[in-house]
Image (cartoon, rainbow, N blue to C red):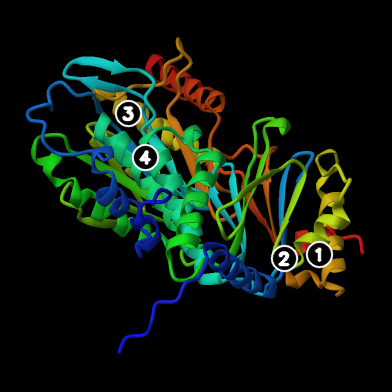
Amino acid sequence: MSQAPFYVSPEQLMKDRADFARKGIARGRSVVVLRYDAGILLLAENPSPTLHKIAEIYDRIGFAAVGKYNEFETLRQAGVRYADLRGYSYDRIDVTARGLTNAYAQTLAGVFTTESKPFEVELVVAELGVTADADQLYRLSYDGSVIDETEHVAIGGQADAITASLSGLHTSSLDLAAVFNHGVAALAAATRSSLPTEDLEAAVLDRTTHRQRTFRRLDETTMAGLRED
Amino acid sequence: MAGFPPAFLSSTSNSFVELARSLAPEALPRDGARDLSEQSPEGTTIICFRTASGILMAGDRRATIGNLIASHSMEKVKPADDYSVIGIAGTAGVALDLIRLFQLELEHYEKIEGARLSLNGKANRLAAMLRGNLGLAMQGLSVVPLFAGVDEVTPHGQIFSFDVTGGKYEEHRFHAIGSGSGFARGALKKLWRPELDQDQAITVAVEALFDASDDDSATGGPDFVRQIAPTIFTVDLAEGVTEIDSAAVLTTAAEVVDRRTRTAGA
């Protein structure tokens, strides 16, 4: 005797999946990406010095993620493959954050609706413009929805608290040290902890560099030099 | 499902060449052309030697088709990444493609793995790429690279030469490739010393390339009319790859020409 098929409404199904993904993401620590006057700062609370949450995708494109490590690592590598293949087939300037964000959005949305379990991740794709007004920040959620931000964007469990504490701040007119300290303060306030420098991971996309690849990690000494607290 | 092709998400390879071969083979240089060797520009003399602090690699700027000069300003020596340089002699189109592909191969590995390949690893990867190019070499479109650089394990630097079949050989003092290499190597035998500082090394490189251009029609000398100087790169662990400013190279070249003019007149 076979069991009678039971009905689950699409609303319920999507809600269950979204709750599941949100719970996974809320467990992790947050990442915040902020523009400053000469570039973009990617800042994360991450005690591990090797398992990065922040990474380089291409010459002017940075990547930040929270959630399940194996899932966002797969997405990061896919992004590097997308960017390198596109840049080799056309030209390096033809690799854009918008194209990459679209590919991420489609993949996340596809997995969210068709696979047995959604990705428990949130991503930020940041592109450094040639001039400051061409900077782009995209925030991607587990279901593939995209939001573009103008000054700063936070992801992870404490994203709302971080965004609230940074609200009204025009980080793109401040220098790196000031923005770094605002970022650290917002991360620390959201977790109500003191955040030692060795628990931070940071990188910049640097508009002032002469190198083609603008992504640069900040080591502990540099971060300690930037901190004021 | 749109978005990334499935291979982007499931691939386990950190090699860009393998990725491109499976997903976009049309983007890669490929076999199929026949007897093109007489119509394709060719590049000529590259030299490389050890200095007190690391490595110097230099190349002339001329490309030829038969007895014609195809280009006066081709750059045949390029940085492969932040700590290594590559110079290529042979069919220009294939050579430039190979350089671009090799640069991307190293960058792709670095981004996927989060760490740089070792210097030996890079050299082995280049050898494998040459082996993949064997079909083109059999049609006369051969390229022979010279690769050198430094890493933490070998801070004093290593130089590797290759043949068209992908054979890889380490050179311990200096080496030259291309049609003028015999003359350049002769000059280096007399001029090279292990403890050359930066200025001395640049002079030695200019002298060796000058000798090559003196006797080999396919190697270009310093061009004072168009202000074209040989390409010179140095590599050391402290500074990484540095290109020597072409004005400085031209000044050194003018001194070399002056000295030789005086010697010839005396």
Nearer to us in this view, B195 or B107: B107
- In front: label 1 or label 3: 1
Q: Chain of mark 4?
A: B
Quick check: marks 1 and 2 in contact, CB under 8 Å? yes
Circle 1 sits on which residue? A187
Q: Cα distance, mark 1 to mark 2?
A: 7 Å
**Which numbered dot is residue B211?**
3
- In front: label 4 or label 3: 4
Q: Cα distance, mark 1 to mark 3?
A: 63 Å
User: Which amino acid, mark 3?
Assistant: Asp
Nearer to us in this view, A192 or B256: A192
Q: Residues within 10 Å of mark 3 (few under 14, many from 20)?
A: many
Work out whether mark 1 precedes mark 2 in sequence or the reverse, and give the earlier one: 2
Nearer to us in this view, A204 or B184: A204
Q: Quadrant of the N terminus of chain A?
A: bottom left
Residue at the limit of the structure toward the top, as seen here: B225
Q: Cα distance, mark 4 to mark 1?
A: 41 Å
B103 lies above or below A50: above
Q: Residues within 10 Å of mark 4 (few under 14, many from 20)?
A: some
Residue at 62%, 73% (x, y): give it.
A24
User: Which amino acid, mark 2?
Assistant: Ser
Decide if residue A125 is in sight here. yes
Work out whether mark 4 precedes mark 3 in sequence or the reverse, and give the earlier one: 4
User: Which amino acid, mark 4?
Assistant: Arg
Q: Chain of mark 3?
A: B
Kindly state the secondary structure of the residue where label 3 is placed: helix
Q: Cα distance, mark 2 to mark 4?
A: 38 Å
Q: Cα distance, mark 2 to mark 3?
A: 62 Å
Residue B262, horizontal then vertical, whole percent: 45, 18
Circle 4 sits on which residue? B100
